[in-house]
Amino acid sequence: MVYLGLGCFLLHVFVVFGTEITFELPDNDKQCFYEELEKDVKFDIDFQVIAGGNYDVDSFVTDPLNNVLYNEQKKQYDSFSHTTAMKGVYKVCFSNEFSTFSDKTVYLDFRHGDEEPIIQTMTGPVALTQMESSCVSIHEILKAVADSQTWYRLREAHDRTRAEHLLERVTYWSIGETVLLFVIGIGQVMMLRSFFSEKKGSVAATT
């Protein structure tokens, strides 16, 4: 088992580069990210708004000549894939300019490049050995586990933010109801006292 794990580690070679970030996007603001890419390189973008307002942002992607490759408004989450047609700096932007008072928290996953086979003989006619097949299986399972963990982290952050926002609203509502009950109680006491004061005055006048 140790040799199998060591063999898989040695065969586990990638040329995929990626960046995962979570950033704050203030209201009436726009934030852009830049990446220099070679020609014929595939890149993938995944994003999701995990906190703030209606959980939506505007997003667009441009090539080195400022041609728009992707443009969507008020999206909560989305994915985009593209293969570059030229070398240069590609720009990914997120805008919250339509919001006047709500900050947003955005998760961004940017990946580019192709993943080479972890075993070079996978692309040839030669059959894989049992150890090589096990390495490939472990590799695919680990990729699925990593994607699942990312998804669960995003869902947990999103649900926690919603729960905290709901707690804040319930707290303010409870405080408002408490104040209203005190005001109504004091008002009823004052009204009852005024009734008795009027009766005392009328009795004194008749005597």
Image (cartoon, grey):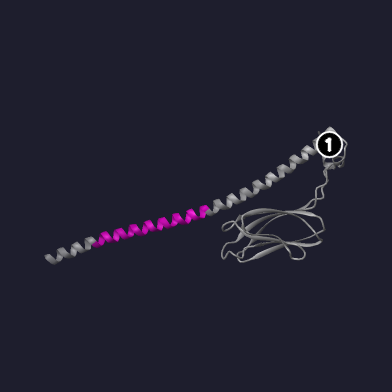
- Residue 94 vs 134, above or below: the answer is below
User: Residue flagged by tag 1: what amino acid is it?
Assistant: Glu
Q: Secondary structure at mark 1?
A: helix
- Residue 169 vs 30, above or below: the answer is above
Type of secondary structure dominating the magenta stretch: helix
Quadrant placement of the N terminus:
top right
Q: Nearer the viewer, residue 6 or 96?
A: 96
Say which quarter of the image contains residue 62: bottom right
Is residue 20 on the magenta stretch?
no
Question: How many numbered dots are placed on residues in this image?
Answer: 1
Is residue 190 on the magenta stretch?
yes
Q: Nearer the viewer, residue 158 or 76?
A: 76
- Residue 125 spot, x, y in % from top left: 87, 37
- Residue 58 spot, x, y in % from top left: 64, 61
Q: Nearer the viewer, residue 68 or 53?
A: 68
Report whether residue 45 is seen: no
Which residue: 84% across, 38% down?
7
Report whether residue 1 is seen: yes
Quadrant placement of the C terminus:
bottom left
Which residue: 15% across, 63% down?
203
Q: Which residues are magenta?
A: 166-194
What residue is pinned by disc 1?
Answer: 132
- Residue 49 spot, x, y in % from top left: 63, 55
Left or right of residue 187: residue 157: right
Say which quarter of the image contains residue 196: bottom left
Left or right of residue 193: residue 205: left
Q: Residue furthest left?
A: 207
- Residue 110 spot, x, y in % from top left: 73, 54
Left or right of residue 201: residue 89: right
- Residue 114 vs 136, above or below: the answer is below
